[in-house]
Image: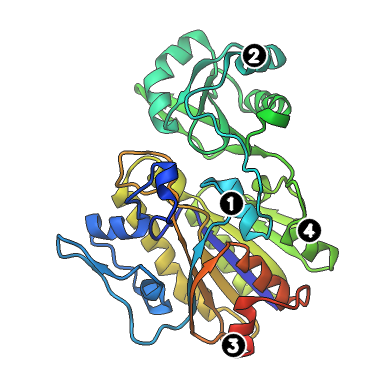
């Protein structure tokens, strides 16, 4: 028995009731992309994406999101319990760990004492130290970085500390080591969810990030579904940045991927292969390449790439396999902000033995963890499991 859990990074489906507290009123990653690009996801629609609470609508420009008559999957809208909108909190909650106190964000810049401690520990002097889009800041500061050889420090509304450097100035391993040191500094009341190494290269005055990004996360501050499955002898396989997010804990095998094409290829191969357990996948391009860059067309194309892969993935599922499609937060590329957005996320559960039913709006991404735990006999009560298998 296998469970394929796929997180389409930042694929939100509309602002949550408390979006005003995050500056995200009006955010609707999926809906606004459809409005602005005319996107139609044939296979997602047939599964029931457009039937989820609040998703179907008609826009003033005539674009529509239309539900189907007979969805093929069980579907729901999930509301995040954790008071956050970042990758780490979202993935933790999907894995059953709801953070009472989300990791710290630095909405303006890192304080002077933190920067001084970082510089002293790593033996460098930083430039930047601002809230910025990663692709924008390397274009703006790239030339100065080449001259000064100072790594670029920046953050966002996510709980992250990011360090960027051209690999001709700071070799990859040195950049990783600086980030490891920064991870050691950013503990306790300074703790951010992730320290991220952002290597880039230059040519003809243009600066381009490479696919050698590396995340340095904190170990989860509590027990996750991955821990429980591993303790019960159930194999857990990670694809994409899942290993980084969970600091490797509770994961038996990991497949590093540089982009969605690689992630979908690995996922498809794993559906063909024999095996069991949980296969936990993150598809990051929607967020990293397009959401944060306010590129609605690119985001739409990335969703189409995933949509086109679904028929083969679904065809490869064995009788007792399940494919779960969901997200960890929003990142609406049509709003002025380049940060994540506080949104509901979709839940689609597909399988030959899955009853295609509307599960409504459920409070908590951790409903996913409960469902998977119930499938493996680790939990007796699960709203989703009971509705799908007990009627």
Disc marking residue 353: 3
Viewer-side residue, 128 vs 262: 128
Instruction: Give the residue displayed 71% in from the left and 24% down from the top.
Output: 185
Label 3 neighbour load within 10 Å: few <14, some 14-19, many 20+? few
Count of numbered badges drawn on the protein: 4
- The numbered mark, 4 or 1, whose residue comes first in the sequence reads 1
Look at mark 1 in the image and give the residue it sits on.
82
Provide the secondary structure element on which disc 1 rests.
Answer: loop
Return the x and y of residue 274 as percentages of the image width and height: 70, 75
How much space separates mark 2 and mark 1, taking CA atoms? 32 Å
For the view shown, which residue lies furthest in the left direction? 61
How much space separates mark 2 and mark 3, taking CA atoms? 56 Å
Instruction: Give the residue displayed 31% in from the left and 71% down from the top.
Output: 56
How much space separates mark 4 and mark 2, taking CA atoms? 35 Å
Seen in the picture, residue 239 relative to 186 is either above or below; the reply is below
Return the x and y of residue 167 as percentages of the image width and height: 55, 24
- The numbered mark, 2 or 1, whose residue comes first in the sequence reads 1
Label 4 neighbour load within 10 Å: few <14, some 14-19, many 20+? some
Provide the secondary structure element on which disc 4 rests.
Answer: helix
Q: Quadrant of the N terminus?
A: bottom right
Look at mark 4 in the image and give the residue it sits on.
227
Viewer-side residue, 387 vs 290: 387
How much space separates mark 3 and mark 4, taking CA atoms? 27 Å
Find out whether the residues at labels 2 and 3 contact each other: C-beta distance under 8 Å. no
- The numbered mark, 3 or 4, whose residue comes first in the sequence reads 4
Look at mark 2 in the image and give the residue it sits on.
119
Viewer-side residue, 40 vs 65: 65
């Amino acid at each position: 028995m296998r469970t394929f859990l796929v997180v389409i990074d930042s694929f939100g489906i509309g602002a949550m009731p408390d979006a005003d507290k995050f500056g995200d009123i009006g955010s609707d990653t999926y809906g606004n992309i459809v409005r602005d690009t005319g996107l139609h996801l044939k296979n997602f629609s047939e599964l029931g994406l457009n039937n989820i609470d609040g998703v179907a609508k008609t826009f003033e420009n005539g674009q529509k999101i239309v539900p189907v008559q007979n969805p093929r999957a069980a579907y729901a809208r999930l509301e995040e319990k954790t008071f956050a909108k970042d990758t780490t909190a979202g993935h933790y909650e999907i894995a059953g760990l709801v953070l009472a106190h989300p990791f710290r964000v630095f909405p303006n810049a890192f304080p002077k004492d933190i920067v001084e401690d970082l510089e002293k520990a790593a033996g460098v002097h930083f430039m930047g130290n601002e809230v910025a889009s990663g692709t924008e800041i390397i274009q703006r500061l790239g030339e100065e970085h080449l001259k000064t050889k100072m790594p670029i420090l920046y953050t966002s509304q996510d709980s992250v500390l990011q360090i960027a450097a051209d690999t001709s100035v700071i070799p990859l391993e040195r950049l990783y080591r600086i980030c490891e040191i920064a991870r050691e500094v950013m503990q306790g009341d300074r703790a951010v969810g992730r320290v991220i190494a952002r290597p880039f290269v230059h040519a003809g005055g243009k600066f381009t990030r490479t696919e050698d990004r590396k995340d340095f996360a904190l170990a989860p501050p509590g027990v996750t579904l991955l821990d429980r499955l591993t303790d019960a002898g159930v194999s857990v396989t990670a694809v994409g940045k899942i290993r980084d997010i969970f600091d490797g804990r509770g994961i038996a095998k990991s497949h590093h991927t540089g982009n969605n094409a690689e992630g979908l290829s690995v996922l498809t191969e794993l559906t063909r292969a024999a095996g069991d357990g949980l296969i936990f996948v993150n598809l990051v391009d929607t967020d990293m390449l397009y959401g944060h860059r306010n590129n609605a067309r690119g985001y739409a194309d990335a969703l189409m790439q995933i949509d086109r892969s679904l028929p083969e993935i679904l065809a490869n599922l064995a009788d007792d396999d399940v494919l779960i499609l969901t997200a960890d937060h929003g990142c609406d590329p049509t709003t002025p902000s380049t940060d994540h957005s506080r949104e509901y996320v979709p839940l689609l559960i597909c399988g030959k033995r899955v009853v295609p039913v509307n599960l409504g709006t459920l409070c908590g991404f951790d409903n996913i963890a409960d469902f998977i735990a119930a499938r493996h006999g680790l939990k007796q009560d699960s709203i989703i499991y009971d509705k799908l298998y007990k009627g």
